[in-house]
């Protein structure tokens, strides 16, 4: 169903690791660690400033892949992982893009399930990778039928 999109990626989008957004995110996840929200704690840390929580990249804009669309309902978030080369620093700007890495199907009790592997990437403005996030989106038989009509 999505095999033709494997290897396609979006045009990079510039995002900011904004101080207020980091504070709100840390509060929303219940982790107001001083490294995220306290300027003095950040300044005296080994990072020399505040950093964002590890799952903060979920709020970034990764652009769109031309012709690729998933519905907003009926999908299952299978799993997600993050790999960092270094922390995201509050105040920096980064380029983010997404790429379709794989698509495969398996038989389930309610019909065929589709497994879409999506990779999100954040790089500094010189193109050096900061993080990679990989997610598996499970597409149920019902959604697959809706998408194929």
Image (cartoon, rainbow, N blue to C red):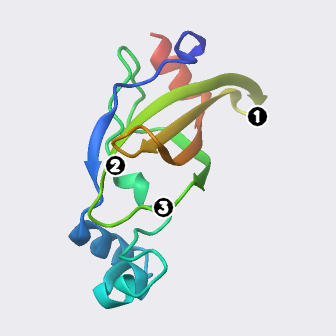
Residue at image x 71%, y 23%?
Answer: 105
- Residue 90 lies, with reference to residue 32, above or below; the image says above
Q: Which mark is residue 60?
A: 2
Q: Is residue 137 left or right of residue 106?
A: left
Kindly identify which residue carries mark 3. Answer: 55
Q: Which mark is residue 109?
A: 1
Q: Position of residue 7 (x, y in %)?
A: 56, 18
Q: Is residue 92 left or right of residue 102?
A: left
Residue at image x 54%, y 26%?
Answer: 100
Q: Position of residue 17 (x, y in %)?
A: 30, 59
Q: Position of residue 62 (x, y in %)?
A: 36, 38
> Upstream in the sequence, badge 2 or badge 3?
3
The answer for how far apart the CA atoms under marks 2 and 1 are is 35 Å
**Secondary structure type for disc 1:** loop
Q: Quadrant of residue 63?
A: top left
Residue 51 visible in the snapshot: yes
Residue at image x 64%, y 23%?
Answer: 103
- Residue 123 lies, with reference to residue 139, above or below; the image says below
């Amino acid at each position: 169903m999505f095999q033709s999109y494997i290897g396609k990626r979006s045009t990079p989008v510039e995002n900011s690791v904004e101080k207020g957004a980091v504070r709100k995110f840390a509060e929303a996840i219940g982790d107001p660690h001083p490294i995220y929200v306290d300027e003095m704690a950040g300044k005296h840390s080994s990072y020399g400033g505040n950093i964002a929580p590890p799952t903060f990249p979920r709020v970034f804009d990764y652009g769109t892949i031309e012709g690729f669309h998933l519905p907003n309902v009926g999908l299952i978030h299978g799993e997600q992982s993050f790999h960092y080369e270094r922390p995201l620093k509050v105040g920096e700007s980064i380029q983010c893009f997404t790429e379709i890495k794989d698509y495969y199907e398996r038989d389930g009790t309610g019909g065929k399930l589709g497994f879409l592997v999506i990779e999100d990437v954040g790089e500094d403005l010189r193109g050096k990778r900061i993080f990679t996030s990989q997610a598996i989106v499970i597409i149920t038989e019902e959604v697959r039928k809706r998408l194929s009509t």
